[in-house]
Amino acid sequence: MRVLLSAYACEPNRGSEPEVGWQRALHMLAYSDEVWVLTRSNNRTAIEADPLSCTSGLYFVYYDLPQWVLKLKSRSWFFRIYLFLWQWKAYRQAAKLHRDRPFDRVYHVTFATIQSGTFMGRLGIPFILGPIAGGERTPLRLRRSMPMRSKAGELLRDCWILFQRYSPLTHHACAAAKRIYVTTPESLRLISPKWHFKTSVQLAIATHQSAARNDKWRPPDSPRFVFAGRLLYWKGVHFAIRALAEARRTVPAATLTLIGNGPDERRLRDVARNANVVDAVEFAGYLPRQRIFDAFHSYTALVFPSLHDSGGLVVLEALAEGLPVVCLDLGGPGIIVNSSCGIVIQTANADEAQTITSIASAMIRLASMPAEDSLRLSTGAIARANELSWARLTDRVAGEEG
C-alpha cells in the first residue's frame, strides 16, 4: 500500500509540530509499503541529515511557494493567506504525484489544524484528517488577571474558533474525510455535529515508548518546581508564580524555575515581585532540549498550568524522564496526566483564586510526600509516557483504517 502524508511541518529533533510530522512519517511504515511525505523545502537539510530519512520505503517530496510569497510570509496579515496558498499548491503537487502512480490513502498530518484548509480530500481516495487542534479556549473565569491586550487576544481567538467551525474550508475538509481526529474534547467544537459520527479524540503528540525506570531521578532535598515552555500569557505561568507564593507559607524552601523565554517575561517578573517571591523564582532562559531533559532530574515536579494547550509535548517529555506533573484539566495536558503520574487541577466553576490555591495545594502535597510515594509517582510517570507512544497513536489513526 502507498500512502501520502501532507506534513507542512516535518523535521527531526525540533519538538512541537515538526516532530509530529517526522514521527508520523516514520511510524506509518509499519502499515504501508511506501510512505510519501509532502513537506516544505526548508525542512530538507534537517531531514536528509538524519539517517532515518534513508529508511527503505520512505520518500520525501519538498515543495515551497515562490520567493515573493515567502517574503510576505513574515507579515502577520498575510500569514494565514500564505498557509492557504501552501495547502492548495501542495494539493496540486499531490495530484500530480497521484496521477503518475496512484496512492491508496492520504493523511493531513501538520499543521495540526484546518484553519488554512486542506484539499487532500479532492484526490478521490480515503482521506484521514488529523488529529487536528485549535478548539481549546481559556475559561472566562481564568482571564481576570490577564492584561487588556491578552484579554482582547483571547476574545479574538474565541471568534476565530467560531469562524473555523462554519468556514467553507472546514466544511470541505470534514465532508471529504473518511475519518476525523481531534486532539481534545474541546476541539470537537471545530467540527459540526453532523460530522461527529466519524470523529474521535486522539492526541497529536506521543513518546517513543522507550522510557525505562529512571535511576537518575530522586526527590530533591528541598522542593524545587519547574516550568518549561514559551513565556506567553496563556501558558498560565502567572498562576504558577502566585501559587508558589501561597505554597511557601507552608513550605518556605519551595522554589520555581522558569525554563524558556518569551514576550511575557517582563510581566512575569512583575508578578513575582508583587507576590514577594523574586528570590524564589529563577528565570533560566532558553535551554536546548537535551539540557532540559537532564535538568528535569533535579526537580520535584513540572508545573504546567497552560490554559489552552492542545498538546503540551513538554508534559510528555517530563513524564518520560520520570518527573511528575501538575497541570490544569484543560487541553492536552488534562488528557495526558492522571493520578498515577501527577496532579490534575479541576477548573470547572473555579475562579483564578481557587485555581491558584489548588495549584499551591498540589505543590505542598508533592513537597511533603514521603520519598517512596514520590518514587511511585515517578514510576507512574514513565509508565504513562510509554502508554502514549507514537506506535499506539499511529495504530489508532492508521491501523483501524486498514
Image (tube, rainbow, N blue to C red):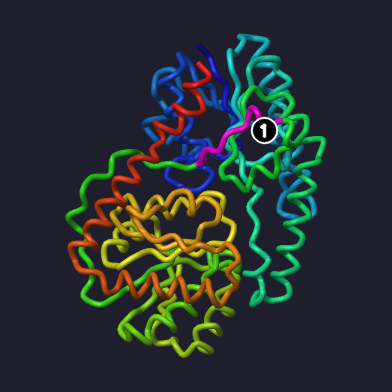
Look at the image and tell me whether residue 122 can be seen: yes
Look at the image and tell me whether residue 68 can be seen: no
Q: Is residue 173 above or below residue 291?
A: above
- Residue 170 position, x and y percent, is 75, 36
The residue lying at 33 percent from left, 71 percent from top is 365
Q: Kindly indicate the quadrant of the structure image that contains residue 388.
A: top left
- Residue 295 position, x and y percent, is 31, 63
Please rate how many residues cluster around mark 1, counting C-alpha atoms within 10 Å: few if below 14, some from 14 to 19, many from 20: some
- Residue 383 position, x and y percent, is 29, 45
- Residue 301 position, x and y percent, is 34, 65
Q: Which residue is mark 1?
A: 196
Highlighted magenta segment, given as a residue range: 195-204
Q: Is residue 103 above or below residue 77?
A: above
Q: Is residue 83 above or below residue 74?
A: above
The residue lying at 69 percent from left, 23 percent from top is 93
40 in the magenta segment = no
Which structural element holds mark 1? helix
The residue lying at 58 percent from left, 62 percent from top is 348
Q: Is residue 373 above or below residue 21?
A: below
The residue lying at 38 percent from left, 42 percent from top is 207
199 in the magenta segment = yes
Q: Nearer the viewer, residue 299 or 36?
A: 299
Identify which amino acid the numbered label 1 is placed on.
His
Q: Nearer the viewer, residue 193 or 319?
A: 193
Q: Nearer the viewer, residue 105 or 100?
A: 105
Q: Is residue 400 left or right of residue 50?
A: right
Q: Is residue 214 left or right of residue 89?
A: left
